[in-house]
Amino acid sequence: MMKRKPIGWLSKGRSVVLMGLDYAGKTTLVDQWTRGVTGKTTATIGLDIEHVEIQGEKFNMIDLGGQQSFRITIWRTYAQMAQGVIFVFDIADRLRVKEAVDWFWKVVEWLREDAPIIFCANKIDLRDSKKGSAMSLEEIINIFNLEKFSQDEHIQHSFRIFEISAKTGENVEESMEWLFGKVVGSTKKSKIKGVLIYSVEKNSVILELPFTDTVKDFHKQKSIIDIIDYNKKLLNKNQSTMQYYEQDNLDVYVFAQEGFLCLIITEKEADYNSVRITGQSILNVVSVLDKDGELKPDQLKWVIKESFGA
């Protein structure tokens, strides 16, 4: 059994995100696992965060509100930042199955390629009720088409389905142990060598974050200056764009969104899809922090380091 303990508010730590429609049981699952108790809960408004320590590593457990307004506004950003995802489905909610299926596969599309996923088929305690509305495991697998995770297009994701009861605690420990074991045990090294954020409005670099000495002070390099100048001219605040520049020893990807440029310097042959998700995710974070008046270099640095594994 994993050793874990709740800890105070953190500014650092990797993130595991809980997603699912409202009333699927996400908050009950968090309460059951972190405290061993459950009680009457209300719908999460926006998000709640629990902080846990597992095998010496600190994690943010981010419980996202499942109402449609939150699915539309914040799910994508947090999914892209996640080191692991817990998707919770109420097996008795037959009226919204199609809605849950659609959102589940949207989440899968947003994830980084190495993020493990668990599908928690919740409320198995209801199978003994006289109503008999709870779905079987076979039915859930077929409806959600979960067999796709054995196919090449999704093989990069570690995936498991668990039948659980957040209310009674059945299989909760096993599901969390599997997910956090995958996240803690991940040793995949990022091919990202540096990140630069440029504000067109301020006409200045607001963050330069090198991960190796070879790209230190890369904002001073003529090739980087030329790339920034060229992309400033292309920038349209109403569009998100991406450009790719091949250099001698490294490659540069430029992502533009809402008045900001994000330059990602990578090794040769870095996985395009992984870089794309990272660049778009970083700009989403920049946009959220900017709108909240919290766009500070130090905060951005730890978000990029902790959330994107660079």
Image (cartoon, rainbow, N blue to C red):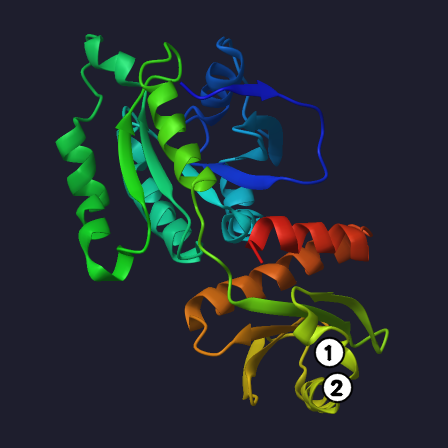
Which percent across, then down, holds residue 153?
Answer: 26, 61
Which percent across, then down, holds residue 257?
Answer: 65, 71
Which percent across, then down, holds residue 37?
Answer: 49, 8
Residue at 61% from the left image edge and 28% from the top image edge: 51
Residue 218's tag is 1
Quarter the C terminus occupies: bottom right
Secondary structure beneath label 1 = helix
Residue furthest front as drawn: 213
Q: Is residue 147 above or below residue 279?
A: above
Residue at 61% from the left image edge and 20% from the top image edge: 6
Task: Give the quarter of the image for residue 198.
Answer: bottom right
Q: Is residue 267 visible?
A: yes
Task: Give the quarter of the image for residue 279.
Answer: bottom right
Task: Give the quarter of the image for residue 19.
Answer: top left
Q: Residues within 10 Å of mark 1 (few under 14, many from 20)?
A: some
- Please state if 108 lies on the left or on the right of 301 as rendered: left
Contact flag, marks 1 and 2 (Cβ < 8 Å): yes
Name the foreground residue: 179 vs 247. 247
Q: Amino acid at mark 1?
A: Phe
Which percent across, then down, holds residue 296?
Answer: 81, 55
Residue 221's tag is 2
Q: Is residue 295 visible?
A: no
Residue at 78% from the left image edge and 50% from the top image edge: 292
- Please state if 56 lies on the left or on the right of 212 as rendered: left
Q: Could you tell me how many numbered marks the image carries?
A: 2
Q: Is residue 68 above or below residue 190?
A: above
Quarter the N terminus occupies: top left
Q: Residues within 10 Å of mark 2 (few under 14, many from 20)?
A: few
